[in-house]
Amino acid sequence: MTEKQDIGALVEVLLQTRRVTVSTGAGISAESGIPTFRGQEGLWKQFRAEELATPTAFTQNPELVWEFYDWRRGIIAQKTPNPGHQVLASWENIFPSFSLITQNIDGFHQKAGSKSILELHGNIWKVRCTEEGTVTENHEVPLTKIPPLCPACGALLRPHVVWFGESLSPVVLNNAFQQSASCEVMFVVGTSAVVQPAASLPLAAAERGAKVVEVNPDPTPLTPYANFSFRGKAGEILPLIDEELKKAFSAKKD
Ligand code: BV8
């Protein structure tokens, strides 16, 4: 075991830590059975992102784009959060300051019990009116009408997600940068760390002196900057860290 994979050493750091930020990507939901984007079986290996996850694609073919999202909603609706999501939900009650940032749109962090989540790329269970901009929840699976129309004005609804080439919500993004730049430890879990601006968040943390902890079976462009790098599945590594952390907390109290 190298020092970068030493859970004991990480727990020593966490015992002295008040402010923790976690940033998650598709990998944390992989063990729940949700396909990732860039792995061997990733969605972007089977489908072209340009044809399904851009504003141009939606303008040209809203039916096709909605069929893609309806299919993904069907998969997500049948699955549940895993121990990785659950550990992160419990950490809200452990660290005096804890924030959770996710690129995922599946809503699994909420389902696992996390209360405060910065969803960088939106949420697949929300729809937005293309005319009025109104955002509403929609949990219909499968959708009865594709593409769905706004019940108030009849205009086209779109998924309330951020597509490639679209800006993220400035409020959410500023908050995410603030939480990253002000934490003492930043966990980065299950992301290939290539999509911007999400990939810059841990770098902002590192620049301000935070320790960066990566959890991912494979190396990423972030790996050279990580103080700790656990090569494994989030649903296995996070519970291991959690177990050691809780043991150390109770030993400290005795
Ligand atoms: C923006 C929501 C300003 C929808 C997604 C050229 C032209 C145009 C744009 C660009 C360009 N060059 C750069 C850009 C900017 C672009 C970008 O970064 N592109 C990259 C690909 C080069 N970014 C944007 O466009 C962003 N907006 O910049 O605005 C702007 C405006 C105009 C023009 C330019 C810029 C908006 C990006 C948001 C895109 N929307 N999702 C939907 O989901 O349908 S992004 C897409 O990737 C996914 O949806 C996901 O949200 C995101 C991140 O992916 P990851 O979560 O990291 O998943 P991935 O599959 O890649 O990796 C999984 C990882 O998990 C792997 O490392 C694997 O090893 C690991 N893993 C596997 N199993 C496990 C595990 N880890 C732990 N445990 C396991 N069990």
Image (spheres, helix red, strand yellow):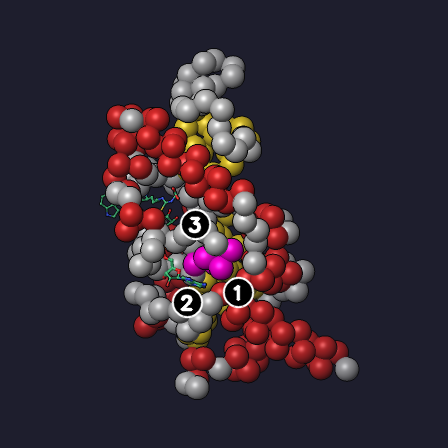
Mark 3 surroundings: few (<14), some (14-19) or many (≥20) residues within 10 A: many
**Residue tagged by mark 1?**
235
Which is the main secondary structure of the residues drawn in magenta? helix
> Residue 2: x, y in percent?
41, 85
Q: Is residue 31 magenta?
A: yes
The response on whether ligand 1 sits within 8 Å of label 1 is yes
The response on whether ligand 1 sits within 8 Å of label 3 is yes
**Residue tagged by mark 2?**
216
> Residue 242: x, y in percent?
60, 71
From mark 2 to mark 3, how far is it between C-alphas? Answer: 15 Å
Q: In the picture shown, does residue 58 fall above or below 19?
A: above
Q: Nearer the viewer, residue 205 or 164?
A: 164
Q: Nearer the viewer, residue 194 or 41?
A: 41
What segment is highlighted magenta in the picture? 27-32
The response on whether ligand 1 sits within 8 Å of label 2 is yes
**Residue tagged by mark 3?**
103
What element does badge 2 sit on? loop
The residue drawn where x is 49% and y is 65% is 234
Q: Is residue 193 magenta?
A: no
What element does badge 1 sit on? helix
Q: As drawn, which residue projects farthest toward the right?
A: 254
The residue drawn where x is 48% and y is 39% is 73
Q: Amino acid at mark 3?
A: Gln
